[in-house]
Image: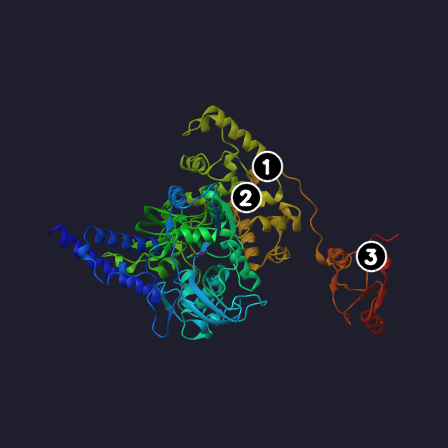
């Protein structure tokens, strides 16, 4: 085949593929591939068309910008076109952009830029006439969009009538309608509970919600809008700069980004980009970069446009958080409690700013729901420091002959049976501490910072110690010798001695740390602390029945059963005895008295009138002595404490013949009376 024929065939293939993705994205709001992949397809097609201009067809996706209108919405022609933005992906791109600007502007001193996060939603134009909202339209292709007025009217943060009275007679504002992350999660949780389809991300949820033929549906969706531009304004812009003009919108009841700032020069832009990048995950909505605009409107006018993108603005994008790659294998990892977790081994891919070659699949239910298979092309998401995950499979790229993943019957590490209890998501290796994987994980946990805090005992070292059979359980750590350690990889005399010193230091600990370090299922730091406070000593906890354990705050029947089961295991008792014999010690405290033994147990108090100390103070102290504090007087009330101006509660107490105390009487009862 000639080069031209080859290019023609590929271009046709790309057009078909892109058209299908356009339909999925713009009409169904259900993209099948990440944006980064879509961009690559478009780039490849553009590249072919620029090398062989005779191959450009009128229906090529390169010949239109923006989305396809959905049937059912009236068309709206934008009098002032809605702009698109050029992208920058690196500092170099940003510097090149500023250089181009400076070449066209007559500027001394740094250019002032308006900076704001780039929201990932749906661009919208709102038209107000005489202060009333008369039109809401999507961007569409920038010239013609869809009339979504009825839907826009349901969004509570968009005023139907502008505030104040000093607005221009005609005011068109542009901005982004988006769905904050919390609302998106809640919407998807509701859909999941009803067995309905979920949205892939907040942007598609926002687009899907706005482009609904029934405004009632839109009204039920948590949408909001930030403004970032203007269309027609009858009186011209309200100020000389973009930032000041946009800020006027706040007076009229519209929202703008709370992150809007002006920065000086490209260095200011880069600092802003880095700052927003660090705070990205804490923002309550998704963003995909930062937008910079030359702040002076006169300069904007002087700079003008290239096709539909203004020279005076640029979107500095963050690295894509979703990418495509291939699943090379699906392995099973065994955790401390035996949980068997499927992990996808991937062809390495750069995503969210790092190279990723493993992604968690959480559990088997998840693997089956997503139907991830070895050989599949999958979408990987890596957001911030969150563990990378497999979002979904691109089914149309599944090769022939793949097979559904099955849960291994036997532990890949120790060969013990793996069980997945009915109705539970997690499968477990039944090998317990016979299983080297569980042993390793339990020793890593034992040594971790919030447990025994043994510095220098890292994961790799634990693995060597277990593999070389030097350590079978945490107690063995305290019998390691220098000679044994020095024989290990990357372990010199000095680091061996340091580790022995750290081990010695760790022997002096606290009961909550020790309890947590044991790695009892469902016993995290908070529960360990509560148990230590409740019982005061390890012996008391070991001797407690499940009922007694449940008297601990936040310990329910399941946790109590795990704790009791742990201490029943002879092996666990043995390890604990060995640890204590090796010299681990802590200061034991007095147990918290049982509630029924407290001096005011079973007594109900009502506090009324003004007291000399905050009511909550007294309430806490009464509760600490076992009393209940109620807000209303009834036959069950034992004491009413009356301060100044007590009101109706005192009258009611007198009526019911309830004992009445003044503040001094209360203090006496609390053991503070004089
Ligand atoms: C977003 N998406 O947040 C613009 N944008 O300005 C901001 N988009 C924009 N500005 C001109 N903050 C065209 C698009």
Q: Residue 462 sits in which quadrant?
A: top left
| Image x and y of residue 158, in percent | 52, 67
User: Of label 1 and label 2, which has the lower sequence position?
Assistant: 2
Q: Residue 202 sits in which quadrant?
A: bottom left
User: Of label 3 and label 1, which has the lower sequence position?
Assistant: 1
Tell me if residue 657 comes above or below residue 421 in the rendering: below
5 sits to left or right of 252: left
Residue that carries the numbered disc 3 in the rendered image:
612
Q: Are marks 3 and 1 in contact (CB under 8 Å)?
A: no
User: Of label 3 and label 2, which has the lower sequence position?
Assistant: 2
Of tags 1 and 2, the one toward the viewer is: 2
Tell me if residue 433 comes above or below residue 240 in the rendering: above
Residue that carries the numbered disc 1 in the rendered image:
584
Residue 599's tag is none
Q: Secondary structure at mark 1?
A: loop
Of tags 3 and 1, the one toward the viewer is: 3
Can residue 217 be seen in this snapshot?
A: no
| Image x and y of residue 8, in percent | 17, 56
């Amino acid at each position: 085949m000639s080069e031209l024929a080859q290019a023609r065939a590929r271009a046709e293939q790309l057009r078909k593929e892109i058209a299908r993705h356009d339909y999925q994205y713009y009409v169904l709001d259900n993209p099948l591939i990440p944006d980064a992949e879509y961009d690559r397809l478009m780039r490849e097609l553009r590249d072919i068309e620029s090398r062989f201009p005779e191959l450009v067809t009128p229906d090529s996706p390169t010949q239109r910008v923006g989305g396809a209108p959905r049937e059912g919405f009236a068309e709206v022609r934008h009098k002032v076109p809605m702009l698109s933005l050029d992208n920058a992906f690196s500092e170099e791109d940003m510097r090149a952009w500023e250089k181009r600007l400076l070449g066209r502007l007559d500027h001394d001193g740094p250019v002032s830029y308006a900076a704001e996060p780039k929201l990932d939603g749906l661009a919208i134009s709102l038209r107000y006439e005489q202060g009333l909202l008369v039109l809401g339209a999507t961007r569409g292709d920038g010239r013609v969009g869809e009339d979504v007025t009825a839907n826009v009217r349901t969004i509570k943060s968009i005023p139907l009538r502008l505030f104040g009275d000093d607005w221009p007679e005609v005011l068109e504002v542009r901005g982004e309608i988006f769905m904050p992350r919390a609302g998106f999660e809640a919407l998807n949780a509701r859909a999941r509970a009803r067995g309905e389809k979920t949205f892939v991300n907040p942007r598609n949820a926002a687009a899907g919600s706005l482009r609904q033929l029934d405004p009632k549906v839109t009204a039920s969706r948590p949408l909001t809008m930030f403004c970032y531009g203007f269309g027609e304004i009858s009186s011209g812009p309200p100020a000389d700069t973009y930032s000041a003009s946009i800020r006027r919108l706040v007076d009229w009841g519209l929202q703008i980004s709370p992150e809007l700032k002006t920065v000086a020069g490209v260095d200011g832009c880069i600092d802003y980009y880095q700052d927003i990048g660090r705070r990205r995950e804490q923002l309550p909505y998704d963003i995909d970069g930062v937008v910079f605009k030359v702040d002076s409107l006169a300069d904007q006018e002087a700079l003008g446009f290239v096709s539909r993108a203004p020279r005076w603005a640029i979107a500095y994008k963050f690295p894509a958080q979703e990418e495509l790659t291939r699943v090379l294998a699906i392995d099973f990892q065994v955790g401390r409690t035996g949980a068997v977790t499927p992990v996808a081994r991937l062809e390495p891919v750069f995503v969210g700013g790092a190279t990723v070659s493993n992604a968690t699949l959480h559990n088997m239910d998840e693997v089956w729901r997503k139907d991830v298979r070895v050989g599949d092309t999958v979408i990987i998401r890596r957001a911030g420091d969150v563990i990378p995950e497999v979002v979904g499979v691109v089914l149309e790229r599944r090769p022939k002959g793949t097979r559904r993943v099955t849960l291994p019957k036997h532990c890949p590490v120790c060969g013990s049976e793996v069980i997945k209890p009915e109705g539970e998501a997690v499968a477990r290796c039944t090998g317990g501490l016979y299983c080297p994987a569980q042993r390793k994980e339990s020793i890593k946990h034992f040594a971790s910072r919030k447990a025994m805090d043994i510095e220098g005992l890292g994961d790799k070292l634990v693995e060597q110690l277990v593999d070389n059979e030097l350590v079978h359980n945490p107690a063995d750590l305290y019998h390691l010798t220098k000679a044994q350690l020095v024989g290990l990889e990357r372990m010199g005399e000095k680091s061996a001695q340091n580790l022995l010193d750290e081990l010695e230091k760790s022997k002096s600990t606290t009961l909550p740390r020790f309890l947590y370090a044991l790695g009892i299922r469902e016993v995290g730091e908070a529960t360990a602390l509560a148990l230590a406070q409740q019982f005061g000593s390890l012996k008391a906890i070991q001797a407690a029945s499940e009922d007694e354990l449940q008297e601990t705050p936040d310990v329910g029947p399941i946790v109590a059963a795990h704790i009791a089961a742990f201490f029943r295991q002879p092996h666990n008792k043995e390890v604990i005895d060995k640890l204590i014999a090796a010299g681990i010690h802590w200061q034991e405290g007095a147990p918290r008295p049982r509630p029924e033994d407290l001096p005011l147990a079973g007594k109900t108090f009502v506090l009324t009138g003004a007291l000399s100390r905050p009511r909550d103070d007294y309430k806490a102290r009464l509760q600490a002595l076992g009393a209940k504090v109620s807000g209303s007087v009834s036959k069950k009330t034992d004491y009413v404490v009356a301060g100044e101006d007590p009101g109706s509660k005192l009258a009611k107490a007198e009526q019911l013949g309830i004992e009445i105390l003044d503040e001094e009487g209360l203090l006496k009862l609390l053991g503070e009376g004089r």
